[in-house]
Image (tube, rainbow, N blue to C red):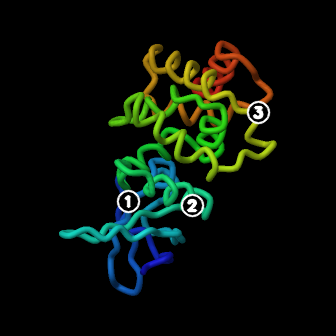
Amino acid sequence: MISSLSGTVRHKDLHYIVIDVGGVGYRVAVTTDTALEASPSSSIFLWTHLAVRENSLDLYGFSNLENLGVFELLITISGIGPKTALGILNVATPAMLRQAVASGDTSYLTKVSGIGRKNAEKIVLELKDKLKVSDADKGIDTRTEGDALEALVSLGYSERDAREALKHVPKEVKGASERVKAALKNLNA
C-alpha cells in the first residue's frame, strides 16, 4: 500500500493535485485547503490512503496524520465512502468534528453535500467512542460556527472563503455575530 508520497507538484485543481515522484505522476484527491496550499513546481509531502475498488485505485492525500486518521475512521462507517469522508474534512477540521461528535451536534455535518440528518446522526453515533475530545477542542461550538458560516454565505461570500476566514478567528471570540464580525475583518483585509 502507498502510505505517503513526496515529490513535486505538477498540476493542481481544487479537488486533486498531481505529484511527480521519480518521473511518475500520481493523481491524489485532497481537501481544498491542501490544494490551496500546494503550488506548482514546489515540493510536497502527503500521507496517503489508497482506496482499492473493482475498477479503480484512488489515492487520497493529507498534510498530517490527524486528518488521515479521521478520514480512515470515517470510511469505516457504512454508507460513507472516501469522497464523502473527504467532503466532511473539507467542511470540518478534525477538532470541529470531534466536538460535533462529543456534543451530538449534527448541524455542522449536514452542511456536507450528500449527508442528511440520518447519516449525520449515524456518524455521530458510530464515532462517539472512537474520537477523543481534548481540552483544546472544547472551545469550539459547532452550532455557533455553523451559524456564522451560514451568515457569511448569505452575505455573498463563497463557502470556501467564509470557512477560511472563520479559521483565523480566535477561539476566544464567542457568539455567531461576534465571529461573523471578526471574520468580515479578515475577509476585507
Please give the residue where the numbered disc 1 appears in the rendered image. Answer: 29
Q: Earlier in the sequence, mark 3 or mark 2?
A: 2
Please give the residue where the numbered disc 3 appears in the rendered image. Answer: 139
Residues at circles 3 and 2 in contact by the CB criterion of under 8 Å: no
Residues at circles 2 and 1 in contact by the CB criterion of under 8 Å: no
Q: Tally the marks.
A: 3
Q: Residue at x 73, y 41 (%)?
A: 137
Amino acid type of disc 2?
Gly
Q: Is residue 139 left or right of residue 27?
A: right
The answer to whether residue 14 of the structure is visible from this angle is no
Which percent across, then down, holds residue 150? Answer: 50, 19
The answer to whether residue 104 of the structure is visible from this angle is yes
Cα–Cα gap, marks 3 and 2: 22 Å
Cα–Cα gap, marks 2 and 1: 16 Å
Task: Say above or below: 59 vs 175.
Answer: below
Per the rendering, the mark at residue 113 is none
Q: Quadrant of the C terminus?
A: top right
Badge 2 element: helix
Q: Residue lying farthest left? A: 55
Q: Residues within 10 Å of mark 1 (few under 14, many from 20)?
A: many
Which percent across, then down, holds residue 44? Answer: 52, 69
Badge 1 element: strand
Task: Say above or below: 65 vs 32.
Answer: below
Badge 3 element: helix
Amino acid type of disc 1?
Ala
- Please identify the quarter of the rendering in which residue 105 is found: top right
Per the rendering, the mark at residue 69 is 2
Cα–Cα gap, marks 1 and 3: 30 Å
Q: Residue at x 36, y 57 (%)?
A: 16
Q: Nearer the viewer, residue 49 or 14?
A: 49
